[in-house]
Image: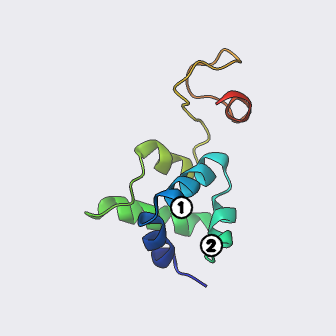
């Protein structure tokens, strides 16, 4: 079983893996991503780990919005007008349908 630090190092060094991680966060399946890559932690452990990384001088390249999603936020900004008429903070349904 990998530690969060080991998986972090892998994600940090692999752009495709980094994109997969961010996608998992946006889709609310971060725990599945972690398990799939051999790391089982609670959402609280992940949140604390990422917050510590942001405080360090060498953080994983996550935006404040990405970190907020991991920390339990549920709104998204797709940056595009939505077919449902939403232009920001798209709902989960909007993200799946049009973004």
Mark 1 residue crowding within 10 angstroms, few (<14) / some (14–19) / many (20+): some
Disc 1, SS? helix
Name the N-terminal-most of marks 2 and 1: 1
Q: Quadrant of residue 93?
A: top right
Instruction: Give the mark count.
Output: 2
Quadrant including the N terminus? bottom right
- Circle 2/circle 1 CB separation < 8 Å: yes
Tell me where residue 53 appears, x and y as whole percent.
Answer: 37, 64
- Residue 51 relative to residue 82: left or right: left
Report the residue that reaches farthest toward the left: 57
- Residue 95 relative to residue 50: left or right: right
Tell me where residue 87 appears, x and y as whole percent.
Answer: 57, 19
Report the residue that reaches farthest toward the bottom: 1
Q: Quadrant of residue 45?
A: bottom right
Disc 2, SS? loop
Pair 2/1: label in front? 1
Q: Residue at (29%, 64%) from the top-left corner?
A: 58
Residue 37: mark: 2
Above or below for 64 versus 48: above
Quadrant including the C terminus? top right
Q: CA distance from mark 2 to mark 1?
A: 10 Å
Q: Nearer the viewer, residue 55 or 62?
A: 62
Q: Residue at (64%, 75%) from the top-left corner?
A: 40
Q: Nearer the viewer, residue 36 or 76?
A: 36
Q: Tell me the residue that label 1 is attached to.
A: 17
- Residue 67 relative to residue 40: left or right: left
Q: Residue at (65%, 63%) from the top-left corner?
A: 33
Tell me where residue 69 appears, x and y as whole percent.
Answer: 55, 47
Q: Residue 65, can we see it?
A: yes
């Amino acid at each position: 079983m990998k530690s969060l630090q080991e998986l972090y190092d892998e994600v940090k060094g692999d752009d495709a893996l980094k994109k997969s991680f961010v996608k998992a966060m946006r889709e609310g399946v971060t725990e599945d991503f972690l398990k799939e890559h051999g790391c089982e932690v609670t959402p609280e452990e992940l949140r604390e780990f990422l917050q510590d990384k942001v405080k360090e001088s060498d953080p994983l390249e996550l935006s404040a919005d990405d970190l907020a999603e991991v920390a339990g936020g549920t709104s998204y900004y797709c940056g595009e007008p939505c077919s449902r008429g939403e232009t920001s903070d798209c709902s989960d349904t909007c993200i799946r349908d049009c973004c």
